[in-house]
């Protein structure tokens, strides 16, 4: 198991394919033997610089949500695997307004890592998968389904349950709407019911 994560940590597929803006190394933390897997979209600049997932303002909001579901940040950081749909920092936009979004080719180059992790973890102790944000959600749900239809629901995935959350970014307007907050609360109540011990 450790060998798999070390192999992922050394990945340079996108750089080798000529995506010069991409900045390795892959950003993730935790253990493949975990009962909880959180999947983000892609690391931001802060996460890239400190090589740790969800440590910026978006991470603070995510952990405040999960605390409402009874999951403390310290427990999550110690006991969960925090992964990404796209593992390396995609780079800054040329206009310097935010970060680049991974291309479909970049996602395809990175997708074997998530597939391998899911395959191994579902054969071990995995009980809950929380995809965070549209890009992560699309790894499990049809892109035609809206967040309004998905957030607040759960589905089975092998031995685990998948309970999605929206992206907690400050520039995202979805989670700021009152009707959407009710769906987030519903998702958090579903998460609370999963016994992760």
Image (cartoon, rainbow, N blue to C red):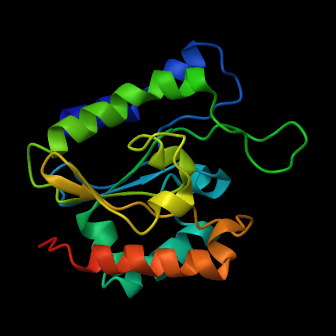
Foreground residue, 134 or 78?
134
Residue in the picture at 48% in, 23% down = 108
Foreground residue, 196 or 18?
196
- Location of residue 6 with respect to 80 vertically, above or below: above
- Location of residue 108 with respect to 179 vertically, above or below: above
Q: Position of residue 41 (x, y in %)?
A: 53, 48
- Location of residue 79 with respect to 85 vertically, above or below: below
Q: In which quarter of the image is the N terminus?
A: top left
- Location of residue 22 with respect to 59 vertically, above or below: above
Q: Where is residue 168 in the image (x, y as percent from the top left)?
A: 59, 67
Q: Residue 123: which quarter of the image?
A: top left
Residue in the picture at 64% in, 37% down = 90
Residue in the picture at 51% in, 47% down = 145
Q: In which quarter of the image is the C terminus?
A: bottom left
Residue 158 is left or right of residue 86, and the answer is left
Foreground residue, 191 or 81?
191
Residue 175 is left or right of residue 108, and the answer is right
Q: Residue 167: which quarter of the image?
A: bottom right
Residue 163 is left or right of residue 178, and the answer is left
């Amino acid at each position: 198991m450790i060998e798999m994560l070390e192999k992922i940590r050394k990945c340079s597929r996108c750089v080798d394919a000529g995506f010069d803006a991409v900045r390795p190394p892959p950003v993730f933390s935790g253990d493949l033997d975990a009962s909880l897997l959180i999947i983000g979209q892609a690391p931001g600049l802060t996460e890239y610089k400190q090589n740790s997932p969800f440590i910026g303002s978006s991470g603070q909001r995510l952990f405040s949500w999960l605390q409402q579901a009874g999951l403390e940040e310290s427990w999550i950081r110690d006991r969960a695997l925090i992964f990404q749909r796209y593992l390396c920092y995609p780079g800054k936009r040329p206009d310097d307004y935010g970060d680049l979004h991974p291309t479909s080719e970049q996602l395809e180059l990175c997708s074997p890592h998530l597939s391998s992790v899911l395959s191994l973890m579902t054969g071990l102790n995995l009980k809950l998968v929380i995809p965070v944000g549209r890009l992560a959600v699309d790894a499990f749900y049809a892109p035609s389904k809206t967040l309004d239809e998905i957030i607040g629901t759960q589905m089975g995935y092998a031995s685990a349950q998948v309970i999605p959350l929206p992206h907690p970014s400050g520039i995202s307007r979805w989670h700021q709407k009152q009707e959407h907050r009710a769906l987030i609360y519903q998702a958090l109540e579903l998460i609370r019911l999963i016994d992760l011990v």
